[in-house]
Image (cartoon, grey):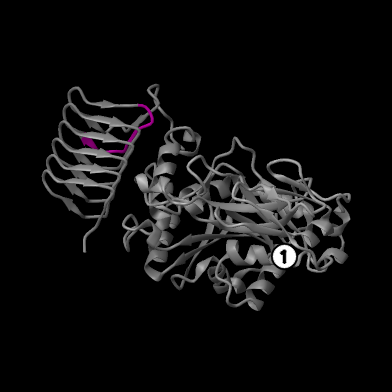
Amino acid sequence: MDFQVVVLAGGTSEKLSPLVSKDVPKALLPVANRPAISYVLDLLESSDLKDIIVVVEGQEAARLVGAWISSAYLDRLVVEVVAVTEDIGTAGALRAISKRLVANDVLVISGDLVTDVLPGAVAATHRRNGAAVTALLCSVPVSGPSDAASSGGKDKAKKPCRLNIVGLDITRQFLLHVVSGTDVEKDVRVYKRKIRAVGQMEIRSDLMDAHLYAFNRTTLQDVLEQKEAYRSIRLEVLPYLVKSQLRSAPSGGEGTIVDETGNVVVPPSSNLQCLSQHRAIAPSAFKQDLLASSGGGTHRCCVYIASKNKYCHRLNSIQAYCDINRDVIGEASHLSGYSFSSHNNIIHPSCVLGSKSTVGPQCMLAEGSQLGDKCGVKRSVIGRHCRIGSNVKIVNSVVMNHVVIEDGCHIQGSVVCNNVQLQERAVLKDCQVGAGYTVTTGSDHKSESLARK
């Protein structure tokens, strides 16, 4: 299949501070004790997409990511790691490597995507429809859209949810309207002229843009060249392509409003009908040939909608990081690449457990880690070569590598990074602890981000 693959691996995202650092870029953050980018690379390999450009923000981050990939995927994938300037956005990253793109079509995938949807299926749909762009849409995770996740703790329930609102044709193949990351308090207008042009449109607010796109190369390069200010694929490039595909539709007409639940709100004078929570139907028949002919625009924008039983989540916030770690050792354990024991957990043979210590289901203990007496671990991931004292409780947490946890500590709903030391009787609840930090004896922290200055 004549596709080039670009993986946008990011750099040291502030959204993930203090988890990421100059020593651990986002792409190498451990998810179930595997670097996050390994999930995307394995997925591409399984679709026989093995010629890959990995774009990393920052020279040092690119060096670290390149060194790991060249070791882990030797003789498996052909990967070129390219460093770009930091904070230039996804569109900026593509623009920076645009001259390297030579294939007819380009598959662009976010390096923080954890999914079991095969990219090859998206690529095949793209080719079959002769599309300018095909976007993967997935059901919104139970915890909410990845783009809306908060930093953890109780605050996540107080922040407004953000919706991706999309308009689809009746076959659910063509993307006719898109508004990304819209506050639920705001109304979104879908103009009558657009619905007149296509005849019928289904409005959905329950789908997430997974940041996996198939592009026609020349179309992509033209947009990146003409729209030099564009920084985001999701917020700028995709909406531009969707809008311009129907630019020759009849002009005029008032807006049909989509309310905070995603319903189409139809004014009394309108000739539209609101038939269901997700659907607005114009009286005319759907003009499928509009999208197939040059009379309706210059290109087609398509979607591949993953089935609801597929797992799809992006690691782009601390809450998402916690959710994905929980899922990969739980309901999405098939993504982990590990074989779970009869107790539904993974304890490396080199681990040492003290007297009366228990490791529950949906837990992972990596090689060389030790637990003292009377410890309890529930629904947590513990990294390599950790030293854990007696009477320690760890629940719903991620503990990375070479962490020392002394007697009597309690950790709940927290992320503890490499080389951290928790002194005796320290308590963490809904916290993030940056690499190398020392949590002092008897201290009690709740919903805090702790990092070395």
Given the current orientation, which residue lies at the most extreme front position? 268
- The N terminus - image quarter: bottom right
Q: Residue at x 63, y 58 (%)?
A: 179
> Measured from the top left, where is residue 238 in percent x and y?
65, 62
- The C terminus - image quarter: bottom left
Tally of numbered discs: 1
- Magenta highlight on residue 51: no
Asked whether residue 108 is in view, the answer is no
Residue type at numbered disc 1: Lys
Is residue 53 toward the left or the right of residue 1 in the image?
Answer: left
Asked whether residue 220 is in view, the answer is yes
Q: Residue at x 79, y 54 (%)?
A: 270
Q: Dot 1, how many residues are within 10 Å of its Cα: few (below 14), some (14-19), or many (20+)?
A: some
> In front: 283, or 438?
283
Callout 1 secondary element:
helix
> Measured from the top left, where is residue 70 in percent x and y?
44, 57
Is residue 297 toward the left or the right of residue 337 in the image?
Answer: right
> Measured from the top left, where is residue 375 in percent x and y?
21, 29
> Measured from the top left, where is residue 203 in percent x and y?
70, 49
Q: Give the extent of the magenta segment.
A: 361-370
Is residue 367 toward the left or the right of residue 192 in the image?
Answer: left
Residue at image mark 1: 243
Q: Residue at x 43, y 61 (%)?
A: 66
> In front: 381, or 104?
381
Q: Main secondary structure of the magenta part?
A: loop
- Magenta highlight on residue 368: yes
Q: Residue at x 50, y 50 (%)?
A: 161
Q: Is residue 99 above or below residue 38?
A: below
Q: Residue 191 appears in which quarter of the rendering?
A: bottom right
Is residue 201 toward the left or the right of residue 378 in the image?
Answer: right
